[in-house]
Amino acid sequence: MNQSWHTHNPNGKYRVIVTKTLPGSRWIDILAAADCRVDVCQEKSVLDIETIRAAMGNRCHGAIGQLTETWGETLFTALKAAGGTAYSNYAVGYNNVDLEAATRADIPVGNTPGVLTETTAEMAVALTFAAARRLGEAERFMRAGCYAGWLPDLFLGNLLNGKTLGIIGAGRIGTAYACMMVQGHGMSVVYYDLSDNSELENFVSDFSKFRDARGLPPVTCRRAVDLEALLKAADCVSIHTVLDDSTHHLIDAHALALIKTDAILINTSRGPVIDEAALVDHCRNHPDFRVGLDVFEHEPAMAAGLDQLDNVIVVPHIASATRWTREGMAILAACNVAGLLRGDPLWGKPDILPFLGDQSPRAIPSIVNADELGIAP
Ligand SMILES: O=C(O)[C@H](O)CO
């Protein structure tokens, strides 16, 4: 351990390493109250596997890692050998974690659901409007001193009200985003998912009745028969799926060619769901096609040419970046590790917010390989 690590509660019985400083301080109190010594890496750069393994040394009971790190066979074997029995990702997504390797090492993997839902959905909304109304281009134009007076055709964009929204992945975040766009902007929804989302369908149907009573046109929600049907129907496609083998490059050149040429494409899930080189080509050839990206295929790099495209707005993977959410993620990750080390039961309820109250429940909020390990409630 060198000076880039900071230690809290040095005499704690368990040793937990945390590979980045996390927002807030309550997460440290939670781990300290569970008798953990907490070693926190102060480096901003992404830690490689060797550095993390060296930090574990031969005594490490738990770890909190980042979505930018590859947690696979090497690290889980090392964690187990160091006496480790607990890992939590500081993220809801866990495509950076080899769950089979963790399960083989008998290590439960925690994640941080429930506190990112609205925050990420709000960013998807922000990107949708930024793309539809060309905010990036218009702001660059203003800052460059190009504004010479109001014009009838200056930066004409797309009206979303009354249009069709295509949701790829109607889970927690996709559903929250869909509700915001239906309720706020009168959009109808077509979604692509492995299962029916009757809650979303019922919400839209009830909201349509509310609109009807006010003399407003109906809104509808239906599950697409396949991805092709969604891509052809939508005026705005927003990606909310997990990244796995089945969704890698789900949006490739062929899929892009099916989307309306003046539609909007938003991605706040994981970069590799889109073939980014194909997207650059598509945007070059279709200037009215507009895109908002929070995530990138080879993060932090962008595909060559992406940064030159006026019809693309890009932000640096900040969809969950509100103080409340990032502090909440830290609390959930700490509760995952503290609860595992203490031998608490799994929470098993969908409402995760009680963990953010003054007194977190004596339970483990969320373990993604609980079934595989046979520890599901
Ligand atoms: O998976 C996640 O948690 C987000 O991508 C980062 O907050």
Image: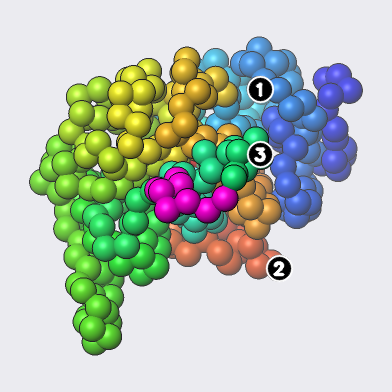
For the point 49% across and 55% down, the residue is 122
Magenta range: 149-156
Q: Mark 3 vs mark 2: which is more N-terminal?
A: 3
Residue marked by disc 2: 358
Is residue 81 toward the left or the right of residue 166 in the image? right
Closer mark to the observer between disc 1 and disc 3: 3
Which of the numbered marks, if any, corresponds to residue 180?
none
| Viewer-side label of 3, 2 | 3
The answer to whether the residue labelled 3 contacts the one labelled 2, judged by CB atoms less than 8 Å apart, is no
* CA gap, disc 1 and disc 3: 38 Å
Location of residue 164 in the rendering, given as x and y in whole percent from the top left corner:
24, 55
Left or right: 58, with 314 as reference point: right
Examine the structure image and report whether residue 116 is included in the region drawn in magenta.
no
| Image quadrant containing the N terminus | top right
User: What kind of residue is marked 1?
Assistant: Val
Residue 258, how many percent across, how many down?
A: 18, 33
149 or 131, nearer to the observer: 149
Q: Residues within 10 Å of mark 1 (few under 14, many from 20)?
A: few
Write down the residue under mark 3: 145
Looking at this view, name the residue that lies furthest to the top. 50
* Amino acid type at mark 3: Gly
Q: Residue at x 21, y 53 (%)?
A: 190
State how far apart marks 3 and 2 are (Cα): 50 Å
Residue 202: image location, x then y, percent = 23, 70
Q: Which residue is mark 1?
A: 46
